[in-house]
Amino acid sequence: MSEVLTKAAARNIFFGGTVFFFVVFLALVADSVGTVSKITDKHPITPSVAAGKRIWEKKACFDCHTLMGEGARYAPELKNVWQRFGGDTDAEGARANLKAWFAAQPSHDPARHQMPQFHFSDQELEQIIDFLKWNSEIDTQNWPPHIVG
Amino acid sequence: MKYESQKVAKLYFIGALTLFLAQVAFGLLGGLLYVAPTALPDFLPFNVVRMIHTNALVVWLLMGFFGATYYLIPEETESELHSVGLAKLQFWVFFIAALVAVVGYLFGNYDGRSYLEQPIYIKVGIVLVALMFLYNISMTVLKGRKTVISNILLLGLWGVAVFFLFAFYLPNNVVLDKMFWWWVVHLWVEGVWELVMASIMAFLMIKMTGVDREVVEKWLYVIVSLTLFTGILGTGHHYYWIGTPGYWQWIGSIFSALEVIPFFAMVLFTFSMVWKGGRDHPNKAAMLWSLGCSVMAFFGAGVWGFLHTLAPVNYYTHGTQITAAHGHLAFYGAYAMINLAMITYAMPLVLGREPYHQRLNMWSFWIITSGVVFMTFALTFAGVVQVHLQRVMGIMTYMEVQDQIGLFYWMRLGAGVFVVLGLVLYLLSMVPPGRAKSA
């Protein structure tokens, strides 16, 4: 390698190339941020959705569940949990069933992964469900492949 | 070891190893919850166990990087550290912040995103620690000899601090939130951390093989070039299914597939340096960890990353146990092992001794490494079955699939016990025999 590449050339390639690729990356990210920011035109982030997201963060839900595939893998994917609970056809039924689900935790069934009891108020439950419903409406290139998540 | 201030690294190494032990202990608890979900009391749910496991990992690796930097920067710059007192203060602020965070986690005091669960005051504390560190190191580099190793290392460490700032950006839009979460996570572990790793490896190669600095530094430039040319746009492989535009599937697939190349270059680099050097360095254990690091990083970060990085594959594997398999071997191979290599190399030197307990240390190498490899295979098989049932056929729910792969989780837990055992041997091998020789 000593003949074909001097150290000065290697240094220039490193710094030049890094700047180049970072600029390309920034341009693409800027474009995506533009597109992604428009999601809220069709799917507005209501105060309730935003509050639901804060609960998601404060209770570290992602340390068991995945959301759009990201998070821990100890519990089901939640991007499409709204659809799994039938929210698309029966929104009120889905809300009632999700609330019942929260209320029944932890199951203490030794064969099932345990979800903590968070003692959420009804308002907080509505916020979390609004947050999950908002996520279910996002176009994720048809991911996940199946309703089971 | 030529400079008195290098000794401050010892504090960091001990702190790092302490947190490593905490990391694997909570790893065992997490592994236990997969096979016996009701084994732990209600106040210790899986999410808390996992955040302690992952946070302890990140903090001990960073602490190891800090220690490695404090050890190698005086030798590279040929000058004492700017301030040993500040380095000690920085250690205690960081270590106590880590303890406060962990205790807080047990009492439900967390807020943020994965790996970044620290409450806001701990995050601010981390920034203060980073500033103390960067000030100390930058001042040392500025007054001393500038080498490629110190420059790349410094660039990497500044990058670590700059990208951490995105931990404070929490937009309401989940998609935006996820995009910039990766600016911390991906641009750390598939970007600037690799610069840190490669610089430490280059330092170890110069010291242990005796190959000319010119040759090593040219290799270092080539490796870090390959890393950032592939890794920056490789971020795209996290932008496939999170609500971002479809073009990321092309960009992410192409560039992240190439991310395997810098890791292969690292294998070529370390082995050719050792052959070329032809020297028999007395610290055989450190040499074993260094070579092992490049090989396991290639398999863990490179091969296991490539396995599921192409968008048409990732469509099915995204967020399954395949990801977990890759995560474990990549972090261990690339970042745990470079730290263990550096600690193995530097510890006898800061204590003013010949290398000691080499055999025990090398046993720990083989036990920990086999344990993590076995764990990786177990999780890979679990992932393949999960992907097939849940993602390809889509015939079983999450929990039904988990019932089908319980055997692999038992194997993973068993492998975890081996890892902990190996780490205990490593810790024992670090305790020097008898009294230190009086200088």
Image: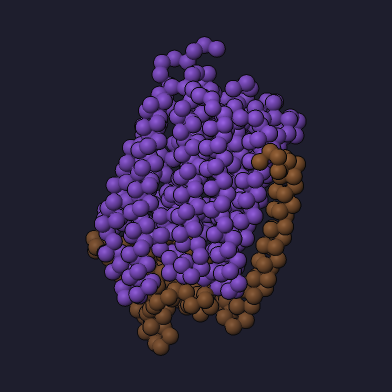
Which quadrant: the C terminus of chain B? Answer: top right
- Residue A20: x, y in percent? 72, 57
- Residue B404: x, y in percent? 27, 64
In this view, the residue farthest toward the left is A110
- Residue B67: x, y in percent? 56, 34
Work out whether residue A66 can be spotted: no
Tally of marks: 0
Q: The chain shown in brown is which?
A: A
In front here: A49 or A135?
Answer: A135
Work out whether residue A54 can be spotted: yes
Q: Residue at x 57, y 40 (%)?
A: B269
Q: In the image, is B401 to the left or to the right of B125? A: left
- Residue B224: x, y in percent? 63, 47
Choose top left, top right, bottom left or bottom right for residue B181: bottom right
In this view, the residue farthest toward the bottom is A89
Q: Residue at x 50, y 36 (%)?
A: B290
In front here: B333 or B179?
Answer: B333
Q: In the image, is B108 to the left or to the right of B408? A: right
In this view, the residue farthest toward the top is B438
Give the colouring mode of the picture. Answer: by chain
Which shade of the palette goes to chain B? purple
